[in-house]
Amino acid sequence: MLKSPFSVFLFCLLRHLDCTVSQHASRVQVYEGAEFVLLPCQVPADVSSDSTAVVWNRDEFTIPMVHKRVQSSDDLTNQNLRYLGRTSMRATALQTGDLSLTLRNPTVSDSGTYTCTARKTGDDLKEIHVQLKVSEPPPRWPIVVAFVVPVLLLAVIFGALVYHANNKVKNRAVSMLKAEKVTEGAEYIKLLWNKSEVPPAAVRVKWTREQPEHGEICECVKDQTGQWKLESGPVYKGRVQMDQLTEGDFTLTLMKPHCDDGGVYLFVVYGQDGKPIKVTVVVLWVKETWWKIITGLFERRALHNEE
C-alpha cells in the first residue's frame, strides 16, 4: 500500500520530534567510592515490546559498548573492558520498559555521557542520554573536626574532674595524717598513735622513719607472758622511750629532737604470720630556732663572698 506524501511528511516530523526529545540528557551525580550508581532509562511499553535488544554505549571510546541486553540474557561480547564485571540490568528490562543500568564502584573516570538505545533487528527505536558525573569525595576533615573536638573537649573536662577529685583525695589524705610540730632544742616530742589500731592478734609493732632517709627507730615484741619489750634501733638508741609500754601504749617519745629528725614516720602493727595488719603515718616537722636561722643566713652569705 502506497503512502501519501502527507503521511510520509507527518511520519518524518514525528520521528524528528521523537529524536529531538530523546536527545535531552538526564543528569546523575555521585561521589567516588559509592557502592553503585543507577543510570535511568525508561521507554514506553510498546517500544520495549518491539525491541529485540537494549544497548548502553559511551561513544567517546573506541570500544563504546558499556552493556547490552537481549531478550533472554546479557550479551557482553563486545563490552569495553573498563566496565567488565561492573554493570547489570534487570532480567525483565525489555518486558517492563525499565532499561536502567546499574554501574558498580563508580570512579571519576566514569564521568561522561551514556546512551541507552532500544533496538529492533539493527534499527534504533529509542535513544535516551544520561550524563554521569562522578566527583571525588568531599574532604572528611570537617566531619573529623566535628567528631574529634567534642571528644577532646569531653576528655579535657573529664581529665579536669579526675584531677580535681584526685587532689581532693590527696588533700583529704594529708589532712588525715597525724602531724606533729616541734622546735629544735625542745626537751622531747611525742609521736601519737591510735590504740584501736593494735588488735589482740598483734605480736609485734615497729616505728620507722621512711622519709627523707629510712631508719629503724624501735621495735616492740610481745613475749610468751604477753608483755611487750622495747628494742631501740642503733641510730635512735638512748633517744626513744615508751612510758606506758606495759599498758600497751606505743606512743613514742623522741628526746632532744633536731632538724634531721623531721620526716615521715610509720607505725606498723604485725600479726602472727609476720604480715602488717595496720599502718599509721605520722609527719614530724622540726622547726629551726630563730637564732639558728639568723646564724645560718650569715654563714651562707660569708660562704658566698668567699666564692
Image (tube, rainbow, N blue to C red):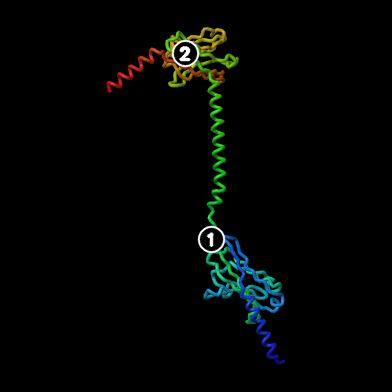
174 to the left or right of 88: left
184 over 130 or under it: above or below: above
261 to the left or right of 148: left
Which residue is farthest left?
Answer: 306
Question: Whole-percent x and y of residue 58?
Answer: 56, 73
Instruction: Give the image quarter of residue 299.
Output: top left
Q: In the image, what residue occupies the spot 56% across and 60% down?
A: 33
180 over 166 or under it: above or below: above
Q: Amino acid at mark 1?
A: Glu
Q: Amino acid at mark 2?
A: Val
Disc on res. 136: 1
108 to the left or right of 258: right
- Taking depth in this image into account, of 1 and 253 the one nearest to the observer is 1
Would you call the spot at circle 1 few (<14 residues within 10 Å), some (14-19), or many (20 or more)? few
Quadrant position of the N terminus in the picture:
bottom right
Q: CA distance from mark 2 to mark 1?
A: 77 Å
